Image: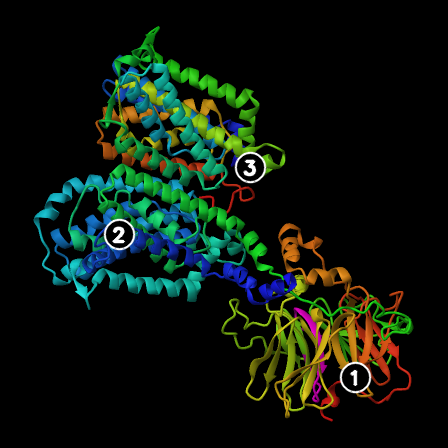
Amino acid sequence: MIKTISRLRYKYWPDHIFGEILQKSWMETAVPLAVLIFTIVFFSVQIDNFISPSNMSDNFRQASELGFVVLGISLVLIVGGIDLSVASIFALSNLLVLYCMHVWQLPLGASVSITLLGGALLGSVNGILIGYFRMRAFLTTMVTLIVFKSIHDLINVRVAVPISSNFPDSPVWDIMGYGSILSIPTAVWAFGIVALFSHILLTRLRPGWWLLAVGGNRRSAYNIGLPVNRIVALSYVASGVLASASAIFYAARLASPGADTGSGLEITVLTAAILGGIRLGGGKGSVMKAILGTLIILLLTNGLLRMATPAGTARIILAMILLMAAALDIRWFKNRHKAVQEMYVSPAYLELPHLPEDTTAPNAAFAPNDRLKAVETIGLGMIEAPEDVVLDDYDNLYSGNRHGEIIRFFAPDYQRHEVYARIGGQPLGMTFDADHNLYVCVGGMGLYRVTADREVELVTDETNRSYLSVIDDSRLKLADDLDILPDGRILFSEATVRYEMHEWQTDALEGRGNGRIIMYDPKNKKTTTVLRGLTFPNGVVLASDKQSIMFAESWKCSIKRYWFDGPKAGTVEMVIDNLPGYPDNINVASDGNYWLAIMGMRSQVFDLAMRKPGFRRRMAKQLPGDEWLAPNINTGCIVKFNEAGEILDVLWDMDGENHPMITSMREHKGYLYIGGISNNRIGRLKLDGVDETFVSSGKYHVG
Amino acid sequence: MKNLFSSLNFDQQTIVTILFAVLFVVFAFWLPGFTSTGNLLELVRSVSVLGILGLGMAIVVIGRGIDLSMIATLAVPASLVMTLAASGYHPAVAIGAGLLFAIATGILNGVLVAYAEIPALFTTLAVGIGVAGIGQSGMFEYDIVAWPPALDSIAWIGRGKIFGLPYSILAFGVAALAVHIFLKKTRLGFFIYALGDNLAAARISGIRVRPIIILQYVICAVIALFAGLVLAASAHSMDTRIFNLTWIYDVILVVVLGGIGLSGGRGGVMNVIVGTLLIGTIVNGMTILNVSYQGQNLVRGLVLLTALMIDSILNPRNEETAKQGDI
C-alpha cells in the first residue's frame, strides 16, 4: 500500500520541475514581477482610485522619466560600478535645457543635442576617473555628485529668474512635456524606444555583451582582449546621457529651475535598480528588470505620498527596502548554486524485477567462467577510455579516447597507431557507413561524422524541443550510441537530457526516464525525437529484420526493441527485462544474434535504494557527491542473446586482469574486439567456429 | 618611483604635514584675522570635532570598511540625549539611552556588512538615511535641539578651558590616545589591521572576523556620539539636519589625506591628526575668505577627488584580495 502510494507520488508529482525552474534565468525576473504585483494589489486595497486611468497615465509619464535614469544606472551596475552623480547630472541638464529653450530661444533640436552632449560630458568625467584612473566608483561618483550639485547651486541663483521670465514658443516642446501620441504620453514613447534599443544592445549586440563580460569578470574580460577601461568609461557616459534625457522630459513638463531638483534621486534610482534585480557588483541585469524596478519604486513612493506618510518615515521605509533588497540579492547570488544543486537532483521511483539469487550459480545462464582470460591486449597504455571500437574494410581498428580524438590502430598486428581525427568531447558509440564515413556520438557535443578524407563534420547537435519540458532539451547533452538504417537514416540514443556526461552517476541515482532515442534524416537534415522517457538508453543496433532496432536501457537493466518501419512501426517491445547487470552497447554477431556488453553488475543495496526515492533525495542533499551510492561498474561480462531474449552465451574474466571493464564489443572476421570506458587498452578475443568473413560495420549496412 | 620616495623619506604623512605648515604660514601672512586668538580657538574647536570623527572613521577604514552614517549617528543620538535630559530624565539615563541608540546603529551597520555582506558604502549610506529619518519623524520637536541646562554638568567637554586650551582639544587628545592604545596595544586592534589587510587570510588564520567587523562599526558609532556631545556642548545646540550637509566628506578627506589608504590595513592615529590639521586649516581659511557654502563644497569636492585619485595611485587595490563587486 505504502509502496503504491510512493510509486504513484514519484511517478506523477513532478519533483524535477522545481529544480529546473529554479535554474531558469527568467526566475530572476519573476521575483521583481511578483513584488510589483504585490505592490499594486497592496496600494489598490489601501487607496481608492489608485488605478484610475488618469492616475495611471500620470504614473507612466513619471515612470518613463525615472526609467531613463534607472536604465543609465543599470548599465553602470551591469559593468560592476555605481553612479550616484546621476541626480546632479539630472539637475544640471534640467537647467541647461531650460536655459537653451527659454533664454537663448534655441530650436528644440539644438537644445536637446546640447543637453545630451552636456550629460555625456559630465558622465565622461566619471568615466575617465573610474575607467582610466581606476578609482572607486562609489566614492568618486559621490564626490562628483557634490561637485556637480555645487556647480548647479552656484549657477541656479543666476539663471532661475531669466528662465522663469521667458517662455519658449515651441509646440513640440509642449507635446514632449504633457502631450500624448495615440493617448500614450510622449515620454513613454521615447522611453519605450530607448528601452527597446537597450534591450537589443544587451541581448543581441556585441557591445552589450562586452558590458556583461566586464561586469561578470573584469580580469577575464581583460584577458580575452576587451578594452576594459574604455567599456567602463563609456558606461558612465551612457548613464550621463540617459540622465540628461530624463531631465529634458522633466524640464518640458515642469519648466522649473528649482534649487532642489533631483535631490535624493540617486537613492531612488539605485533602489529601483536593485529591487528590479540588477545585481550590485555587475555581470547581471536586463532592461526588463530596470523597468520592473522603476515601476515598483514609483508606485511605492506615490502610494506612500498619497497615504500621507511623513517625509522622514518615507525615507526610513525606502532605506529599509533598499537594504533588504541588497541583502537578499547578495545572499541569493552567493547561495543560489547550492540551492539549485540541492533542488535539482530529484530521484524517482524505479523498481527493478527481483534478481534471482542463483543468477550466477554454476549452472545458471550467467555462470561465471574465465573465457575472457584469453584476451590479447591492443595498445596497452596508449589509449585512454575507448568506449566503443569499430573496424573498417581494411581491418584497421578505430576507437575514441578521453581527449576527444579518434585513434586508428593499423592492421594486421595493431602495433602502430595514429590520431585519425580530432573532434573534442568524449567520443562514444561509432559506426562506419558504406562509404567509409565514420559516424560518432560525442558526449557533450552531439552526432559527428569523420569523412573518408578525415574531415570532421557536425551531423546534428539539436533536436526538436519538447513542449512541456522546463529545461531546454533541444541541445544534445549525451549522445551515446548509434546505428545507420538501410536507407541512410541514423537512429541514436541520448542517455540523459538533465545531466552532462561526467554526471552520469547522478542520473543513475535519479533513475528517471531522462533519455531518448533520436532519428536523424540526411535527406532533409531533420532531427526528431522518436522515443522519450527512457532510463539511460545506451547501446543501439539495427535488428536483423532491418525494420527495428534493439536498444539497452542501462538503469532499468533491460533490452527493448523499437520498430521504425514496417507493420509494427512505432511500437516498443520488451526483449529482456531482468538482466543481472547494467547493459551498455549492443552489436550484431555473425550468427544473427546479438552481443551485449554488461558494464557492471547489480547489487541488492542499490536496487533497494532505487525503490526508496526519499532516501536517495536525503542522501543527495546531505552528503557530498563522492559519498553517494553509485551503480557498480567495475566487473562485467559479454553476453550473447537472441531476438527472443534468451541468453545464449556469457563470457567472463573472473580475475579482471586482462580486460577489467567492458562497455562495448564488436565481432570482426572471427575476432571479438572489446572496449571499456575506464580502460587503457583494447581487447581482442579469438572466437571459435564462427564465420571468419563477417564484418559488423560499413558494408554490413549495404547488404 | 617607490625607491625615490623611500630614500627621501617622503611618505604621505610628511607631505601632508609640510603642506599644512606651508598653508598655515601662507594664511597667517595673507589672511587678515587668521592668527587672532578668536579664530585660532574656532579653528581648534572645529578641528577637534572633525578629528574625533576622523578617529572613528579611521578604525573602520583600517578594517577595510567605511561609515557614511557617522554624521547621522553624530546628530540623532546626541539630540536624543539632550531631549531626554531636557524632559527631566537623569543625565546618566539620557546618556545611556543615547549610547544604546548609537550602539544599535553600529550593530546594524556591522551585521549588514559582516553577515549580509552588503558593501559597506552601501549599507552605511542607507543606514545613515534611515537614522536621519528616525530623527526627522517626530522624535524631536524642532530641527534644532538646544543644549538643556540639565546637562550643564558635562558641558565642560565642549566649553571649558584649561591652561588657555579649550577642553574640546583635550577631548580630541584623550580620544586619540584611547584609539591609539586600542589599535596598537590590544589584540583586537591588531586583528582589525589583519582583516583590513587581507580578510580571507585573517579568517583562515582563525580570527573571527565577523564579530570584529561589527565591533569596528560599534566603536565608530560611539565615537560619533561623543563627537556629537562635544559639538553640541560647544555650540549650545545640535542641528539635526546636519546629516544633509557634506560634512562626511571632510571626515573622509581627513582619513584619506592623512594617509590611511581606503584599501585598509594601514595607517594610525598620527595620520588622522595630520589630516585633521590640514582640512581644518583649509576650511577655516575658506570661511575667512567668505567663500559661499556652495563654493566651499566645490573646493572640498575637488580636493577630495584629487586625494582619492592620489590614494588610488599610491594604494592600488589588490586584485588578489579585492572582492568582485567591491564598489
Between A402 and A543, which is closer to the camera in this rendering?
A543
Mark 3, secondary structure of its residue:
helix
x, y percent for residue A166: 8, 51
Q: Is residue A25 magenta?
A: no
Between A456 and B299, which is closer to the camera in this rendering?
A456
x, y percent for residue A191: 28, 61
x, y percent for residue A580: 79, 70
Q: In which image quadrant can residue B274 be found?
A: top left
Label ID, residue A118: 2
Q: Is residue A433 magenta?
A: yes
How many badges with numbers are in the image? 3
Is residue A658 found left or right of A596 in the rendered image?
right
Between A696 and B57, which is closer to the camera in this rendering?
A696
What subunit carries mark 2?
A
Q: Residue pushed farthest left?
A: A165
Whole-angstrom CA distance, mark 1 to mark 2, is 83 Å
Which residue is label 1 attached to?
A642
Which amino acid type is marked by label 3?
Leu
Taking the spot 15% from the left edge, 60% from the top edge, the residue there is A173
* Foreground label between 2 and 3: 3
Which residue is label 3 attached to?
B199
Is residue A458 found left or right of B162 in the rendered image?
right
Label ID, residue A19: none
Q: Are marks 1 and 2 on the same chain?
A: yes
Between B288 and B239, which is closer to the camera in this rendering?
B239
x, y percent for residue B22: 36, 23
